[in-house]
Image (cartoon, rainbow, N blue to C red):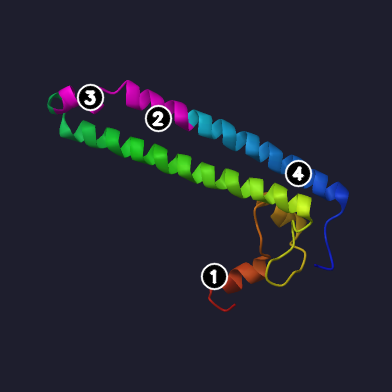
């Protein structure tokens, strides 16, 4: 168990911040879902009968836009999961503690990147393959 953890007051602050981010992500996912539904339903290029009546470039653009929408949806879904895990770490007392050095991750980093599990120094070492 790490020697240092955030105070209950700060953990409440982090929890509120994470819950607000989760709410924002949920709204983003709803917007993306609505856009994907609209593009799928309202697009004649998706109809099998109309495939040959649509210009190939238009069909390609439509396909690209759908693919981009699914990519954004996956990214938002992954972020939602990581924020949910951050809430779990608040509950189990491991929030804000570096997985590598077990030091306390600075508050500023945890507010900006609440799903962080490593301090900046350990993350940089990891990226440079020094860890």
* CA gap, disc 1 and disc 4: 28 Å
Residues under labels 2 and 4: Cα distance? 31 Å
Vertical order, 102 against 58 (above or below): below
Per the image, label 1 sits on a secondary structure element best described as helix
Mark 3 vs mark 4, CA separation in Å: 46 Å
x, y (%) of residue 92? 77, 54
> Residue 24: percent from the left, percent from the top?
61, 35
Specify the label residue 47 is tagged with.
3
* Magenta part of the chain: 32-51
Task: Name the quarter where the C terminus is drawn.
Answer: bottom right
Q: Which residue appears at 87% of the width and 54% of the height?
A: 7
Which residue is denoted by mark 2 in the rendering? Answer: 36
Q: Residue beneath label 1, please?
A: 127
Discs 3, 4 touching: Cβ within 8 Å: no
Magenta stretch, main secondary structure, is helix
Residue 115 seen by the camera: yes
Dividing the picture into quadrants, the one containing residue 60 is top left
- The reply, left or right, for residue 7 in relation to residue 97 is right
Tag 4 residue: 15
């Amino acid at each position: 168990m790490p020697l240092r953890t955030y105070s209950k007051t700060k953990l409440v602050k982090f929890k509120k911040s994470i819950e607000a981010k989760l709410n924002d992500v949920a709204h983003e996912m709803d917007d993306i879902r609505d856009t994907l539904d609209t593009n799928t339903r309202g697009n004649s290029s998706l109809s099998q009968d109309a495939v040959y009546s649509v210009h190939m470039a238009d069909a390609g653009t439509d396909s690209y836009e759908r693919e981009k929408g699914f990519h954004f949806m996956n990214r938002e879904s992954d972020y939602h999961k990581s924020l949910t895990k951050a809430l779990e770490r608040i509950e189990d007392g491991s929030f804000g503690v570096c997985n590598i050095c077990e030091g306390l991750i600075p508050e500023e980093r945890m507010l900006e990147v609440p799903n962080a599990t490593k301090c900046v120094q350990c993350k940089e070492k990891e990226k440079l393959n020094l860890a």
